[in-house]
Amino acid sequence: MSNIEKSANILLASQGKIRSNLRIDNAQIADLYNGEFFHGSLCVHEGVIIGYKNLEADVVIDAEGAYILPNFMDAHVHIESSMLSPAHFAELVIPFGTDTVIADPHEIANVQGLDGIRFMMASAKTSDLDVRIMLPSCVPALPFEDAGACLLADDLAELMGDDKVLGLGEMMNAFGVINQDAEVVDKINLAKRHGKIMDGHSPNLDSSSLDSYILAGVKTDHECVKVEEAQDRLRRAMYVLMREGSAAHDLLNLLPAVNAYNNKYCLFCTDDRHAADIVKRGHINTHVRMAVGAGIEPLQAIRMASLNIAECYGLENKGSLAVGMHANFMFVRSLEDFIPHAVFIKGKKVAEDGKMIAKKQSDNKANDTQACDTQAKSNQRNGNLEKLTSSMRTSMNFVMPKNLDIAIPSGKARLIKVCAHSLFTECDIQAVGIDENGNFDFAKNKGILKIAVVERHKGTGKIGLGLLHEQYGLQNGAIATSIAHDSHNIVVAGDNDADMLLALQTIESMGGGIAMTSQGKVLAKLELCLGGLMSEDSGDVVASKLEKLLELAKSHYGIWDKADAFMTLSFLALPVIPRLKLTASGLFDMDIFGFVNIDAEK
């Protein structure tokens, strides 16, 4: 059926001249424009909402007084952080009422470049989830990073014209924007030539720098952690994306900034949430539930999860239950828990009581294989025959006990100190015990850990070393992961060298993932064969495995209950988040925007 024929049929159905596909009766329908719920019927034809009249329909559903809400959207997410492929991520979030995500695939892009992005787009197309792409603007995150790829404006130009691409992803190189770095300007101009938008990333920017950042074309920011930061951006008509992820819990801190005037500029996002957390807490419906619980009026909270996001990113026919919109909606019985008992996409029920009941294809693992094949063909076109599942190229023979020695001649060291429920860290300077050779001595520093970042993309043998404050809480072994934002080298932390080395070797041998070691044994591991970031397994399977690892992190390792054992560790390698972080090249202090020595006297 052509679009013209479809439009004609929709019009005829709305006039009652032909039967509509679906009518839902006895519903409390969310009106996001007048700010009210109204009781009535909702009619759908050809996947489009056609009115609220009592039209004849092929299928009639009694909503039994349930609330009908537009499906939710995630304004900024890195799907890779779920540890799932897009196809399996979709299976997990759709039953929670999320049908659209604005995804920045810069995690896999840092491992595999454009081919990684193509894999994500191909996998997404096999699901009912509408995945819109913001092309990664900072691969690597900063010029000195040891990533697996480097994407310039000319590279991004290959995909910028794609219908699923909305614009340029979070511009983490804020100083490059402000100082008009040539490579950064090229990317910004690429987005502008295509009439597309740019996401921001501007923690701790002062007012003057923020003005320059916005004037360059940045439209959003998801890095606010304080009300004052949100207000500064809202004052400048910047969209503020309020984040509630697995490691970063910023939502409740920011909600006091929301009022009747600025609500339309406030959006919800997860940024980074792993599979076990999604299964336990939900997805964007978590934000809505928390916002309402904190005093935000329900329809305002629903707008922040739907219509506001559609308007920010120019998503036509999405975000509300108005006539002419896509028939994407959910039934909920309570405006307190916001748990959907049915989810519809384009007028078809796709999930019920927390489970998917329909897929485009029945086997998403097969879909991932198909996506890998697509990506492999792309590799061949570009002269690169390596596949997504062969991303581990370390020089592990370089990593020996002596390579983990940390010289601190002065006995005074800089330590990375994690902050509660945050991606931010502090620089803690304290006296530490050293051995006769001037090296850090575990025996003289109870609770202080070593942390290392091992380059894993090009076999350079580079290792960055640091010390981790006791607040992280790890004891009785080591934990390593190939998820280490944003370059995704291997990060490991531990209370002894032998277990750290075993954890690193385990990561290499299984092609990426998470490894937990103690007293010379591997206690647990999770294989992430897709780029060292994602599993081929379903969301339920990955969530179950990950939950067991998280339980072990508490019971055996004693990880701080205000940190996420794995995601907090993975963000200790991200130098664009204040303050002290560790890269394969060493300790980086964002406050001075430069490398510093572990020895505080140097």
Image: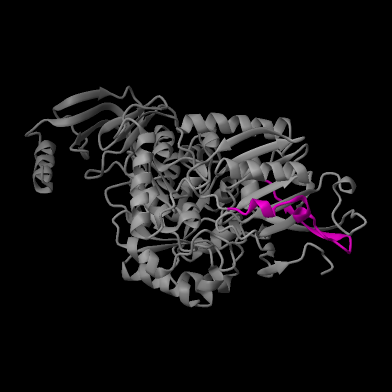
Q: Position of residue 548 (x, y in %)?
A: 61, 29
Judged left or right of residue 597, residue 66 is left
Q: Quarter holding the C terminus?
A: bottom right
Does the magenta portion include 413? yes
* Left or right: 15, with 493 as reference point: left
Quarter location, residue 478: top right
Q: Quadrant of the N terminus?
A: top left
Residue at the extreme right: 436
Residue at the location (76% across, 43% down)? Answer: 498
Residue 422 visible in the current orientation: no
- Which residue shows up at 60% across the image and 40% down it? 514
> Looking at the image, is 8 positioned above or below residue 452?
above
Vertical arrangement, residue 250 with respect to residue 182, above or below? above
Q: Is residue 97 magenta?
A: no
525 on left or right of 23: right
Work out whether residue 589 or residue 214 is closer to the camera in this orientation and state it.
Answer: 589
What is the image's colouring? one colour
Question: Observer-nearest residue: 303 or 507?
Answer: 507
Can residue 589 be spotted in the picture?
A: yes
Residue occupying the far front of the picture: 397
Residue at (50, 42) in percent of width and height: 529
- Above or below for 34 versus 171: above
When the figure is inspected, residue 397 is found, relative to residue 554, above or below; the finding is: below
The number of numbered badges drawn on the structure is 0
Residue 213 placed where, x, y %? 50, 70
Q: Position of residue 420 (x, y in %)?
A: 69, 46
- On the image, the x and y values in percent for residue 268 come to 47, 48
The range drawn in magenta is 394-422
